[in-house]
Structure formats: structure tokens, C-alpha cells
Image (tube, rainbow, N blue to C red):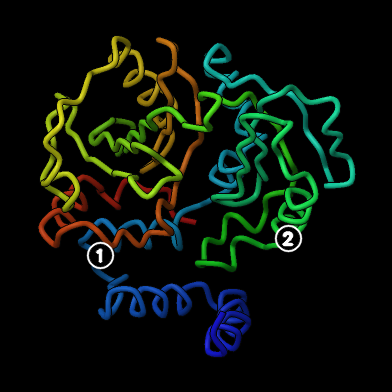
Amino acid sequence: MSIIKKVLRPSFSLLVKASPVIASKVIYYKTFREKLNLKNPTTFNEKLMWLKLKEEDTLKTRYTDKYSVRDYIKENGYENILIELYKVYDSVEEINFEELPNSFIIKCTHGSGFNIICSNKEQLDRKNTILQIKKWMKIDYSLVSCEPHYSKIKPRIIVERFLGDSDGKVPIDYKIHCFHGEPKIIELIFDRGTSQKKCILLNLDWETLPYNEQSINFKEVIQKPEKSNEMLEIARSLSSPFTYVRVDLYYYNKEIFFGELTFTPDACLFTDLSDEAGYKIGNLLDLTKSCVK
């Protein structure tokens, strides 16, 4: 880490605590070299920023939590799509690898990307795994990129069934962007965790949208899941209370599995969208229908 980053990170965290609005403007300008327009937001990123800062976030906090969101899924009648939960721990010291199966995924509930995939327990470096989780458990993720609703999530550790093969390859991630309770864009993530990772954007007819470079250059045929309509219906149901939410699902061995709900994707800083795409997606959000604090 450079000296500059060492200096800027603590100061940015203090700024987030003092003024999430100013912190958001700083990180937005640093990312795009443009001023964040919160008075008249028009692009997807600007409107996501506006929702993050202005909208009531009690439910967002509860359902961003990777453990408590499971209750929401059950309440909506979708317990069957929950990934099997092996263990829940309040601290790293509680983890007992002997009681876990040969393959699993460890997740911290209070952040994004705090995951460890174990496809073979015999090959897992347990010491480094514990050290990594200890670091994650100390992080207030709300201060990383100014996402305030993360600050109210209780840090916990969950261990779930690993959906994937013995080589650690994970299934395609179906991220369904929902606007005012309606699915509009399907984002597919291929080869996650590898240098070949791809992010492809589709409409509901499974046609590629020319919104980012990878989608424009993608020439492969995408197989539509047999249960694609059911996946969209699940996303529609789960997103109904919210102005915007991304419903993440997996389709594995012809079964649908729930991943997570995401209210501030990419910390509201999509960098690979074209300018035109930013405005088109932004038009799907009507901020007058939001739940302002």
C-alpha cells in the first residue's frame, strides 16, 4: 500500500462519519472526475447515490445482512431456494473446522467480498483463513466506500454449502436488477474469481445489451435457464418493497438458489457503463416514488 493510501484511508473514514454526502461527492469525483449531481440526478450512478443518501434504510440494513436476509426469504415463501446453512458464528474463535463438511463457503455477514471458498477441506490453509476472517471482522464496511447502511449490521460469520465443483469453480451468478419491483436487466457473471471473469448485461428476452464493453464483444450463445421465468418471478416478489434492488440468484443442477440482495452495487460507482447506458438505466428509476428519510 502506498503512503498516500495509508494517509487517505483514515481521513476518508473520518469524512464518511462526519458527512456521508461530502464523502460520496469525493469518491464520485475521484472515480469519474465529475461532480456528483444530487440536486438533479440523471444517470444510474447518480440516482443510486441519491437513494443511498436520501432513502430510509432500515430494511436495506436488515436485508443486506447475509444472515438476517434469510428470514426475509422465508417470509416470502422461498425457503426452498436458500443455500444450506451449516453454521453461524459470532466470533472467529468459535470456528471449528472439524465440524464442517469437506466443502463449504465462509462469509462475513457485514460486508461485500468477505468470502472464502473451500472446495476441499484437506487443502485449506486454516491458519491464514482464520487470520483473514479476523481482519474482516474488524472492518466497518460502511467506511470503505461510504455505504452507511452497512454500519448497522452485526458482524457474524456464516458457513454455507458450496455450490461448485472440486476445482473451486463457481456457477454463473444471475444478478437481476429490479426497478420499482420489476426486473429490467439481467447481469451475468461468468468465471468469478479468475482472470477470465466476464460481466454480461441482458434484457429480459436474454438479448445482449450494448451497455458495457464486455457485452458488446461477447459472441458466445447464452443458454437461457429452464427456470428463467421462475427466477424473474422470485426477483419480482423480493424486490417489490424497494425503489431499486439487485436480486442475486444461482442456477445450479437445475435448481434456483438465493445469493443476496444488493442495494448499492459497486458502491454506486459503475465504471464500465457507457455514458448512454448510464442515462438509459437511470431513466428506469423514478426518485419521486422513493421512501425518503
Type of the residue with mark 2: Lys
Type of the residue with mark 1: Pro
Residue at (44% x, 17% y) in the render: 252
Could you tell me residue 89's position as x and y percent?
81, 38
Q: CA distance from mark 1 to mark 2?
A: 36 Å
Front residue of 39 and 244: 244
Side (left or right) of 134 relative to 98: left
Query: Element at badge 2?
Result: helix
Q: Which residue is mark 1?
A: 41
Q: Nearer the viewer, mark 1 or mark 2?
A: 2
**Residue lying furthest right:** 93
Q: Which residue is mark 2?
A: 135
Side (left or right) of 137 relative to 83: right
Could you tell me residue 107's position as x and y percent?
65, 41
Residue at (37% x, 30% y) in the render: 172
Side (left or right) of 14 relative to 188: right
Image quarter where the N terminus lies is bottom right
The answer to which quarter of the image holds residue 205 is top left
Q: Which mark is residue 77?
A: none
